[in-house]
């Protein structure tokens, strides 16, 4: 048994719509339970609202997603919705998230009807298809975040796992349950087809939103991951074919060869720490990378990682509430990578940290003032302006 209970992705605003959907599901379930406490999924109230593959009605593609068979059914679905839905609500906005959630329920229902109509499957109820759409979106938008899970097999414990592998694991179990149910117990009452359809829908919609620019890009989304992987692949291929990025040939450059002084022991140690931290970030060992980065900047605050690693490190430190060190990492990124195409988001994050956590309003004002002219997201622009207004109200008047 695996139960998620926390994600390390910070929220930029309160996910009211996700909370409203959770409340709506529980409200409907209480109506079911009041009519038939022993079998809430079998009351007279429920029957016409279940999605029936043999004779589906239009309203059932929506209503089935707000019904549940029992307490364990709704608690499991709502737990997953709370863990994954909050961040997707944060990314899509309230109305966008509501439309996405309902569309996910519809497409999950369509997938179930298409598959089970010929197979003779029975009616389906439950929010799991819509929740699967949410996890599919999470897979695309936040694949590098981590989920803290409680596990109970032969041992009981808590562990942290990348959301990418967590979601893919459950998707793989659904695929196996659909095509080879004998490996999953055979008689389980799980709508795998709805889960698969919902996940694919959520992932596909999210990719389209990112590629078309309808949803602001993020350095941690799966498209950015794919681009970084491709750059590393191209670089490895070039090195394999003989390219040496550190080679220097005076004859080719037309310059006089200069003998460089040997690095000191301190410089060698810093270079080793920087290399280890870059490698740890690349391997997604962010706690280790944070420790190495802290050692590095403790010895020399002018040290900086590669561009991608530096931004990953700053974001991770902010998510872990290590705000002083995160501010240092963002400042170094600003200093060394000022031409980054989304530098306004770095300045926005840095401004929020200075304002809300480090009590440095003047620095926060400078960062937000730099960010606002370049922000394209209405949500981020509204947040930046609101924070700047608050800061200006607290700063002493100038003569």
Image: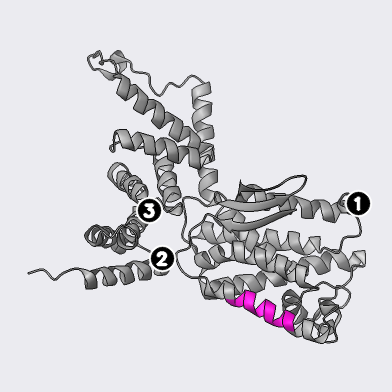
Q: Quadrant of residue 382?
A: bottom left
> Is 86 located above or below residue 161 in the figure?
below
SS label for mark 1 = helix
Residue 147: x and y, percent? 60, 52
Task: Confirm whether the magenta stretch covers residue 26.
Answer: yes
Bin the neighbour count of mark 2 within 10 Å (Cα to Cα): few under 14, some 14-19, many 20 and up.
few
Which residue is the extreme one toward the left?
399
Residue 264: x and y, percent? 29, 19
Q: Does residue 43 appear to the left or right of 249 in the view shown?
A: right
Residue tagged 3: 342
> Quick check: marks 3 and 1 in contact, CB under 8 Å?
no
Q: Who comes first in sequence, dot 3 or dot 2? A: 3
Rendered image coloring scheme: one colour
Quarter holding the C terminus is bottom left
Q: CA distance from mark 3 to mark 2?
A: 12 Å
> Is 187 located above or below residue 247 in the figure?
below
SS label for mark 3 = loop
> Is 351 located above or below residue 102 in the figure?
above
Residue tagged 1: 182
Front-most of residues 386 and 70: 70
Residue tagged 2: 377
Query: Closer to us: mark 1 or mark 2?
Result: 1
Bin the neighbour count of mark 3 within 10 Å (Cα to Cα): few under 14, some 14-19, many 20 and up.
some
Front-most of residues 75 and 177: 75
Residue at coordinates 43% horizontally, 21% vertically from top-left?
244
Q: Does residue 87 appear to the left or right of 299 in the view shown?
A: right
Residue 8: x and y, percent? 53, 54
Can residue 131 be seen from the camera position used here? yes
């Amino acid at each position: 048994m695996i139960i998620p209970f926390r994600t390390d992705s910070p929220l930029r605003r309160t996910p009211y719509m996700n909370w409203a959907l959770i409340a709506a599901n529980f409200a409907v379930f209480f109506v079911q339970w009041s009519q038939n406490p022993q079998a809430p999924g079998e009351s007279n109230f429920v029957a016409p609202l279940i999605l029936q593959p043999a004779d589906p009605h239009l309203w059932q593609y929506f209503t089935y997603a707000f019904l549940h068979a029992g307490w364990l059914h709704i608690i499991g679905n709502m737990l997953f919705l709370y863990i994954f839905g909050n961040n997707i609500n944060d990314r899509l906005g309230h109305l966008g998230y509501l439309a996405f959630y309902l569309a996910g329920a519809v497409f999950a229902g369509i997938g179930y009807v298409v598959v089970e109509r010929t197979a003779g499957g029975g009616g389906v109820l439950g929010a799991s298809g819509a929740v699967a759409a949410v996890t599919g979106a999470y897979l695309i938008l936040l694949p590098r975040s981590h989920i803290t899970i409680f596990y109970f097999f032969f041992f009981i414990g808590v562990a942290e796992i990348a959301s990418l592998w967590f979601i893919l694991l459950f998707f793989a179990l659904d695929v196996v349950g659909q095509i080879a149910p004998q490996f999953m117990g055979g008689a389980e009452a799980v709508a795998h087809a709805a889960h698969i359809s919902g996940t694919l829908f959520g992932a596909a919609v999210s990719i389209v939103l990112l590629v078309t620019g309808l949803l602001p890009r993020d350095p941690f989304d799966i498209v950015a991951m794919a681009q970084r992987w491709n750059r590393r692949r191209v670089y490895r291929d070039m090195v394999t074919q003989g390219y040496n990025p550190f080679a220097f040939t005076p004859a080719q450059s037309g310059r006089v060869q200069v003998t460089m002084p040997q690095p000191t022991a301190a410089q060698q140690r810093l270079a080793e720490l920087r290399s280890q931290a870059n490698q740890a970030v690349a391997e997604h060992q962010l706690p280790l990378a944070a420790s190495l980065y802290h050692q590095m900047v403790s010895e020399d605050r002018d040290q900086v990682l590669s561009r991608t690693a530096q931004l990953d490190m700053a974001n991770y430190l902010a998510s872990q509430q290590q705000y002083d060190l995160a501010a240092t990492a963002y400042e170094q990124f600003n200093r060394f990578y000022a031409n980054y195409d989304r530098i306004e988001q770095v300045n926005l994050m840095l401004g929020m940290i200075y304002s809300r956590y480090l009590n440095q309003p003047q620095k926060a004002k400078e960062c937000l003032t730099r960010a606002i002219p370049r922000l394209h997201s209405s949500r981020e622009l509204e947040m930046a302006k609101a924070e700047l207004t608050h800061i200006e109200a607290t700063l002493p008047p100038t003569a």
